[in-house]
Image (spheres, rainbow, N blue to C red):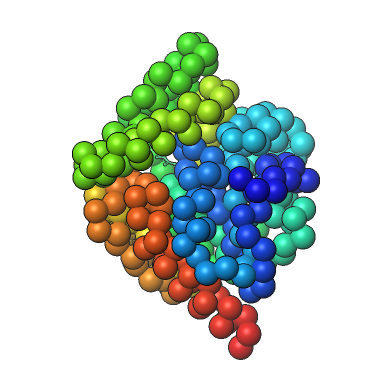
Amino acid sequence: MRHVTTDGPLAAHTLARGDGTPLVLLPGFPIDARVWVDVVRHLPVGRTVIAVDPPGLGRSPDGEAVAHALGAGPEPSLETSADAVAATVRAAGLDRVVVAGLSMGGYVAMALVERHPDLVAGLALVDTRSTPDDDPGRANRLRVADAVLASGDLTELAGTPAMQLSPVSIDTRPELVEQVLAWIGDQRPSGVAWSQRAMGARPDRTRVLAGFRAPAVVVVGDQDRITPVPTAEHMMDVLPDAELVVVPGAGHLAVIEDPGTVAGALQRLLERVDRGTAA
Ligand code: MLT
């Protein structure tokens, strides 16, 4: 990917440059900024777009180092991720942006709205949820974190594409399965463990969404088994100004299964934000 900077605490990939409200893209777990590239290819040119690698994933430093740089506590947390995204965006010279978060990136985007509301002019929540884990889900994350650190490899995550892609994608698009496996294979066990622990500790942020008055869009694959359509509808119930986009045939990774539809949803959001900014 073009033009990676580490001026802030996280690696930021500038995917496009231009006018209008800039777009900041936050990837899902356990992938990095590359998961957004197909969507950006479908966006009209002429807007600044930055994709940020999460702590410990892609080209970003380990979560512990990010927390240390920010003066945050040692426990993995999405609050640290959100503060790091805010510092990275500001280091890129941006002070008001549209944020699009895929799954874990959506959890971070909601923490960003809570902790840095001045930064967020619009919000896209893609295949994500505002509610926390249940106890078995949290316990499983801690088990996975321990397992990847003990083994030093990511075989624990071999089943991820089968969960994240829709059944039709798995049956008919083997290149997507290969792509997801390759992206996962590039990650560091330390970053996977840090992310799992941070996600397991996240609180319910439904009320944060209820207070978010700027334009929003909620995008969900109609075959998403990790954050299914009712979780998207739950967020729609509380967001004051949101569009719902259900992507037919897509699973949890609508961003690569149907990047054109996701880009269309983002473009409409960006236009709503730009209109409001110009008014
Ligand atoms: C993701 O895609 O980021 C993950 O599925 C999120 C999660 O594990 O909750």
Q: Report the residue at 74% width, 32% height from top.
A: 68
Write down which quadrant ligand 1 falls in.
top left
Q: Which is more toward the observer, 254 or 113?
A: 254
Q: With 73 as the anchor, is 53 left or right in this view?
A: left
Q: Report the residue at 46% width, 62% height from top.
A: 42
Q: Which is more toward the observer, 41 or 48?
A: 41
Q: With 40 as the anchor, is 161 left or right in this view?
A: left
In the figure, 133 relative to 216: above or below? Answer: above
Q: Quadrant of residue 126?
A: bottom left
Q: Report the residue at 42% width, 67% height from top.
A: 265
Residue 244 x %, y %: 34, 67
Residue 164 x %, y %: 33, 40
Residue 87 visible (yes or no): yes
Residue 259 x %, y %: 40, 56
In the figure, 130 relative to 160: above or below? Answer: below
Residue 108 x %, y %: 54, 48
In the figure, 46 relative to 165: above or below? Answer: below
Q: With 268 as the anchor, is 68 left or right in this view?
A: right
